[in-house]
Image: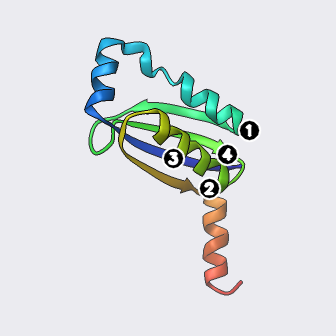
Amino acid sequence: MAQYMLQVGFSSEMTNSMIESPDMFDGSWFRSVVQRLDGRVVGIWACLGKYDAVMICELPDNTSVLALTNAFRATVPLTKVNVTCLLGLDEHEAALKKARGQ
């Protein structure tokens, strides 16, 4: 399965809701959607900087990650979502060899 990193920015509406109910964003919604898509959550972190939270998950394919981001955007008040496909070092090495013509 491929690994994906989702970086999200919360709207002020979402931030206000979380201040009122700090356990609101405990990751249970995200975990349930990933599991429904036959995936697995590696971890969820709050962060400082350009984004408010980072999630790493394993999903079977790009269609599943698109379904996840669409569900996220439709359900959670966000200002931005960024998705990055994460490649293992073995995949990186294979790509370098392909680039070299091997």
Residue at disc 1, secondary structure: loop
Pick whichever of labels 3 and 1 is earlier in the sequence. Answer: 3
Q: Distance of mark 3 from mark 1, alpha carbons? A: 16 Å
In percent of width and height, residue 90 lies at 66, 61
User: Which residue corresponds to the image point at 51% horizontal and 25% vertical from the top-left?
Assistant: 27
Q: Distance of mark 3 from mark 4, alpha carbons? A: 11 Å
> 75 above or below 61?
above
Q: Are marks 3 and 2 in contact (CB under 8 Å)?
A: no
Image-quadrant location for residue 76: top left
Q: How many labels does the image show?
A: 4
Q: Distance of mark 3 from mark 2, alpha carbons? A: 13 Å
Between tags 1 and 2, which lies in front? 1
Label 3 crowd bin: few (<14), some (14–19), many (20+), radius 10 Å: some
Pick whichever of labels 3 and 4 is earlier in the sequence. Answer: 3
* Residue that numbered label 1 is attached to: 38
Please, what is the three-letter code of the amino acid marked with disc 2?
A: Gly
> 92 above or below 22?
below
* Residue that numbered label 3 is attached to: 5
Label 4 crowd bin: few (<14), some (14–19), many (20+), radius 10 Å: many
User: Which residue corresponds to the image point at 67% horizontal and 45% vertical from the top-left?
Assistant: 59
Q: Are marks 1 and 4 in contact (CB under 8 Å)?
A: yes
Q: Are marks 1 and 2 in contact (CB under 8 Å)?
A: no
